[in-house]
């Protein structure tokens, strides 16, 4: 449906609060043979003949993502307040020249590959304290559909909702400066997320959250080890622990990308579900921790005759004793 049809009066296309749509709306939707999709507190009308893709099997992914980001918003708020109070105490003691500025309220989120925008609608309706949410997709039809869904759910606020129609990598590179960083970046592509990782680790704020999905399990699980080496920098093994190995390969790829910019990751939640892996990691700036990154890495040696395997750490911390 061309977007211009929805520019007349968005109230006409808004879902009624009692979940019952008026006669005009029902007639319009019946012509398009749309189905109503209810997910969490969000809902939308979806026409399967449209080019914009809605993945109904990723409901669990979106449910967990909403809860993790909600927890992160609470966590980052308490961290900001604690840091501010410490600086304020130092300034009152005369240890600082000027009084610190109060921390910014709320978090900024980037949905880099938004498609229908249903994920973003759920975020803004179910996560309190969102300062801004940027919805991006390379497809013009996708961003138009996303805006339509925001209007239909009565959450389209021009001060809070930013709609972009760019390559996600380019958009994230435009936000590399610390003043432009996002607190949360959500990447849920079709296939691998590797093309977006380098930009993502730079565009997320210090202490921010990266939410990354990869659906190329055939590559990560060892069916095509040469392809995995080219994409992720790891050579997978076909073994019983393939799900854990897939997660560790993705985490390793995020870590080495972040290390290039004096950053490191701290995994929050990692899961393998059905045909995809999903990780939630916080990204911090610390040159000292980057030096210790080698302590997290290891090689797995798998026996070809039995399920036995062994782990060889890449490095170990040396303990030095001071000479008297």
Image (cartoon, grey):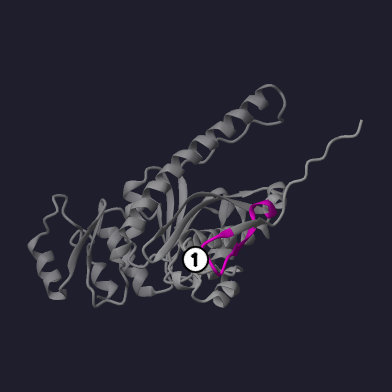
Q: Residue sitting at 55 percent across and 35 percent down? A: 102
Magenta part of the protein: which range?
A: 294-309
Residue 164 appears at what percent x and percent y?
A: 44, 66
Is 254 covered by the magenta stretch? no
Q: Residue furthest left?
A: 23
Front residue of 225 and 310: 310
Residue 111 appears at what percent x and percent y?
A: 43, 60
Q: Is residue 33 left or right of residue 101?
A: left
Front residue of 323 and 55: 323
Residue 65 appears at what percent x and percent y?
A: 39, 52
Q: Of helix, strand and loop, which one carries label 1?
A: loop
Name the image quarter holding the N terminus. Answer: bottom left
Q: Quadrant of residue 152?
A: bottom left
Is 299 covered by the magenta stretch? yes
Q: Quadrant of residue 113?
A: bottom left
Q: Can residue 174 be spotted in the picture?
A: no
- Tell me the residue that label 1 is attached to: 239
Q: Residue sitting at 54 percent across and 59 percent down? A: 248
Front residue of 305 and 281: 305
Q: Residue furthest top?
A: 93
Estimate how packed mark 1 is, as few (under 14), some (14 to 19) or many (20 or more) residues with alpha carbons within 10 Å. some
Residue 57 appears at what percent x and percent y?
A: 30, 64
Q: Quadrant of residue 232?
A: bottom right
Q: Is residue 286 above or below residue 231?
A: above
Q: Is residue 182 left or right of residue 152?
A: right
Q: Residue sitting at 7 percent across and 63 percent down? A: 23
Q: Can residue 115 be spotted in the picture?
A: yes
């Amino acid at each position: 449906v061309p977007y211009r049809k929805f520019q007349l009066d968005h109230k006409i296309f808004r879902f009624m609060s009692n979940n019952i749509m008026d006669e005009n709306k029902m007639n319009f939707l019946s012509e398009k043979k749309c189905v109503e999709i209810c997910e969490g507190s969000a809902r939308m009308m979806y026409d399967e003949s449209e080019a914009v893709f809605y993945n109904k099997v990723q409901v669990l992914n979106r449910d967990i993502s909403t809860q993790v980001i909600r927890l992160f918003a609470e966590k980052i708020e308490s961290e900001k307040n604690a840091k501010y109070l410490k600086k304020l105490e130092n300034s009152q003691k005369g240890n600082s020249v000027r009084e610190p500025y109060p921390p910014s309220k709320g978090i900024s989120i980037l949905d880099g590959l938004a498609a229908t925008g249903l994920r973003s609608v759920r975020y803004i309706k179910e996560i309190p304290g969102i300062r801004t949410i940027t919805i991006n997709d390379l497809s013009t039809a996708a961003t138009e559909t996303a805006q339509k869904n925001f209007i239909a759910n009565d959450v389209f606020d021009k001060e809070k909702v930013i709609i972009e129609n760019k390559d996600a990598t380019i958009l994230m590179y435009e936000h590399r400066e610390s003043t432009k960083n996002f607190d949360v970046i959500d990447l849920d592509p079709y296939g691998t997320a590797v093309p977006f990782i380098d930009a993502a680790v730079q565009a997320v704020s210090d202490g921010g959250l990266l939410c990354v999905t990869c659906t190329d399990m055939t590559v990560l699980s060892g069916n095509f080890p040469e392809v995995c080496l080219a994409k992720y920098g790891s050579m997978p093994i076909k073994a019983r622990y393939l799900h854990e190995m897939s997660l560790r390969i993705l985490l390793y790829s995020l870590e080495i990308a972040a290390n290039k910019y004096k950053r490191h990751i701290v995994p929050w939640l990692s899961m393998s579900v059905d045909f995809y892996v999903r990780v939630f990691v916080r990204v911090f700036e610390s040159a000292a921790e980057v030096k210790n990154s080698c302590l997290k890495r290891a090689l797995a040696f798998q026996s070809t005759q039995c399920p036995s395997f062994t782990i060889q750490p890449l490095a170990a911390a040396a303990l030095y004793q001071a000479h008297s």
